[in-house]
Image (cartoon, rainbow, N blue to C red):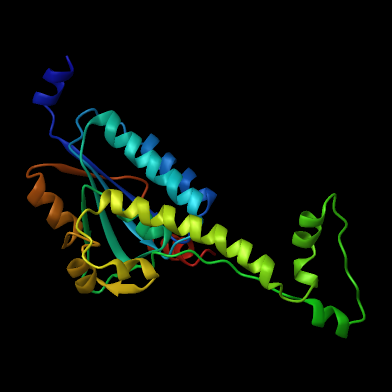
Amino acid sequence: MQTLFKLFTKPRIPIIRLSGVIKQISADKIQDQLDKITSKNISALAVLINSPGGLPVQSDIICQKLNLFKQKHKIPLYTFAEDVAASGGYFVLCIGDKVFADQSSLIGSIGVISQWHGIKKALQNLGIEAKFLASNDYLHEVVNSAFSDFNQEGASQWIDKLEYTHQMFIDHVTSYRKNIVDQNVFKAEVYNGEQAKQLGLIDDFGNFEEILNKLHPGCKFDYVNFPNRMEELKQFYNA
């Protein structure tokens, strides 16, 4: 019955979007879009990405959801960078069977960052002393770090954790992008589309509709839950 159904229906390509800073709600939105795909005759899945990055774990969860959908339907996955696919945005972009961008897209930033904010002097100026109590020395140091001077030993321990996460990022990228030509791409630099192609971070350039029409002639596009322009801007700037 399913084979007969496919004979009399045009194959379709669902097109979903990942926009803005990647956080927990981003993975939820991706799942919501995937759940809305009801066609039984799917030729591929296309993901448009416009993201400067975000939470590493949530980026990985999004990849798992997309790969699970791809494997379930036995279809190729195509990813398209719009204005920017950096850090966590590139983490998701690179999993495509074919990866596309515009010549002016900003691609890369394969790195991991963290912030430390010390407020000791500000509190002293206000005549305030703040301390947290903890069950052990390590936890005591962590919870009071913002109220203390910068601690190089503590920073070194945190840097070790960042380096571990960075290596996981590198391993993820190299597992999908087999033709990386320069290891310097893993130093968190951002490249335009032209440079990204030369370095092996993407495959080619092109408008997603044009590319999909070439790869799957005669297919119909299903734009799944596309936001209007104002909603998209709010998502991108995390409003």
Screen quadrant of the N terminus = top left
Residue found 76% across the figure and 76% down from its top: 149
- The image position of residue 4, as x and y in percent, is 11, 18
> In the rendered image of this protein, does residue 90 appear above or below residue 128?
above
Closer-to-camera residue (78/122): 122
The residue closer to the viewer here, 30 or 195, is 195
Judged left or right of residue 55, residue 90 is: left
Residue 123 image point, x, y percent: 85, 78
Q: Is residue 156 left or right of residue 195?
A: right
User: Horizontally, is 171 left or right of 195 in the view?
Assistant: right
Can residue 95 be seen at all in this image of the molecule? Answer: no
Question: Could you say which is closer to the camera, residue 216 or residue 145?
Answer: 145
| Farthest residue, direction top | 1
Residue at point 34%, 34% (across, down): 68
Residue 172 image offset from top left, x and y in percent: 36, 51
Q: Is residue 151 above or below residue 27?
A: below
Residue placed most toward the observer, 184 or 62: 184
Q: Position of residue 203 (x, y in %)?
A: 17, 59
Is residue 27 at least partly visible in the picture?
Answer: yes
Please tell me which residue is depicted at 39% across the width and 40% down the height of the picture: 64
User: In which quadrant will I find the C terminus?
Assistant: bottom right
Furthest-front residue in view? 153
The image quadrant that residue 201 belongs to is bottom left
Name the residue: 68% across, 66% down: 154
Q: Please say if 192 is above or below 217.
A: below
Q: How many marks?
A: 0
